[in-house]
Image (cartoon, helix red, strand yellow):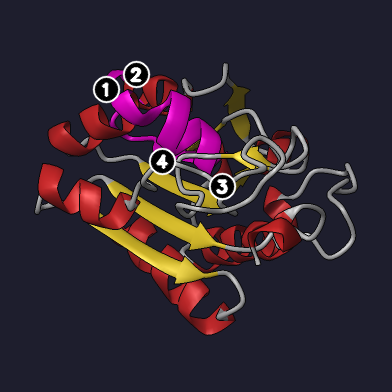
């Protein structure tokens, strides 16, 4: 039952936010795989995706920006029997937390990282993030983003060929569920890059 993992707090994302799809897919796969809620710990980064800290009824930590993976690594090392997950956005995971992401991938720590990648810092109203396309006109780059974007799948494959790392469009529900399932079943480090559009600020990328 997915409600085993759902708190009594109603999600507060914008109407139409695609994080609702991520939230539903995670619950479905936790339930389908019969993950014991008492052995599940979630680590939330700062940002819109990190608001899931209020909506999941599990053990967890709402971490500092960019520090969710570091927390997760420590938890898994101390208690290898836990199912340890990370939920964050492209800012926290690929920006402030990039060094921790690379360290976890190199060590192949058995944690599962789910990234809501909308190519912007959307909680702070739409500034460029590490994955914003080059040339994009955003709130913080009105004349165009001069930086090359990070490509997380390609980057992590150069770090460690033994890990699980895939990207999926959030609107492809069957593939989203299948990818999350395979990541949770994988016996090592796994990252699912979930691409989506911010309904409030994503239009500036078009």
Residue 125 in sight from this viewpoint = yes
Q: In the orientation shown, which residue stands out farthest toward the front?
A: 143
Return the residue at label 4.
147
Query: Relative to the observer, which residue lies in front, 26 or 118?
Result: 118
Return the residue at label 2.
74
Query: Relative to the observer, which residue lies in front, 53 or 185?
Result: 53
Determine whether label 4 and label 3 are within 8 Å by CB. no
Crowding at label 2, few (<14), some or many (≥20) Cα neighbours within 10 Å? few
In the rendered image, the quadrant that contains the C terminus is: bottom right
Q: Residue at left 61%, top 44%? A: 143
Q: Position of residue 202 (x, y in %)?
A: 71, 58
Q: CA distance from mark 3 to mark 1?
A: 43 Å
Residue 10 within the magenta-colored segment of the rendering: no
The kind of secondary structure element at disc 2 is helix
Q: Reading the chain from its start, which is encountered first: label 2 or label 3?
A: 2
Crowding at label 3, few (<14), some or many (≥20) Cα neighbours within 10 Å? some
| 2 vs 3, front mark | 3
Q: Position of residue 97 (x, y in %)?
A: 41, 26
Q: CA distance from mark 4 to mark 3?
A: 9 Å
What residue span does the magenta drawing correspond to? 76-99
Determine whether label 2 and label 3 are within 8 Å by CB. no
Q: Residue at left 39%, top 48%? A: 149
In the rendered image, the quadrant that contains the N terminus is: bottom right
- 39 left or right, relative to 65: left
Determine whether label 2 and label 1 are within 8 Å by CB. yes
The kind of secondary structure element at disc 4 is loop
Crowding at label 1, few (<14), some or many (≥20) Cα neighbours within 10 Å? few
- 84 left or right, relative to 121: left
Return the residue at label 3.
144
Q: CA distance from mark 2 to mark 3?
A: 39 Å
- 35 left or right, relative to 109: right
């Amino acid at each position: 039952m997915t409600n085993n993992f759902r708190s009594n707090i109603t999600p507060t994302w914008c109407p139409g936010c695609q994080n609702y799809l991520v939230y539903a897919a995670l619950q479905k796969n936790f339930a389908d795989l019969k993950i014991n809620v008492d052995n599940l710990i979630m680590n939330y980064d700062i940002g819109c995706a990190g608001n899931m800290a209020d909506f999941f009824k599990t053990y967890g930590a709402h971490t500092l920006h960019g520090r969710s993976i570091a927390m997760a690594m420590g938890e898994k090392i101390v208690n290898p029997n836990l199912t340890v997950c990370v939920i964050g956005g492209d800012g926290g995971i690929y920006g402030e937390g990039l060094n921790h992401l690379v360290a976890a991938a190199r060590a192949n720590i058995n944690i599962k990282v789910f990234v809501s990648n909308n190519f912007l810092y959307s909680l702070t109203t739409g500034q460029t993030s590490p994955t914003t396309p080059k040339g994009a006109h955003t709130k913080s780059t009105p004349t165009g983003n001069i930086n090359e974007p990070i490509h997380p799948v390609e980057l992590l494959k150069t770090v460690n060929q033994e890990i699980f790392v895939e990207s999926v469009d959030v609107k492809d529900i069957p593939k989203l569920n299948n990818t999350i399932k395979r990541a949770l079943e994988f016996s090592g480090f796994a990252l699912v890059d979930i691409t989506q559009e911010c309904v409030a600020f994503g239009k500036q990328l078009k």
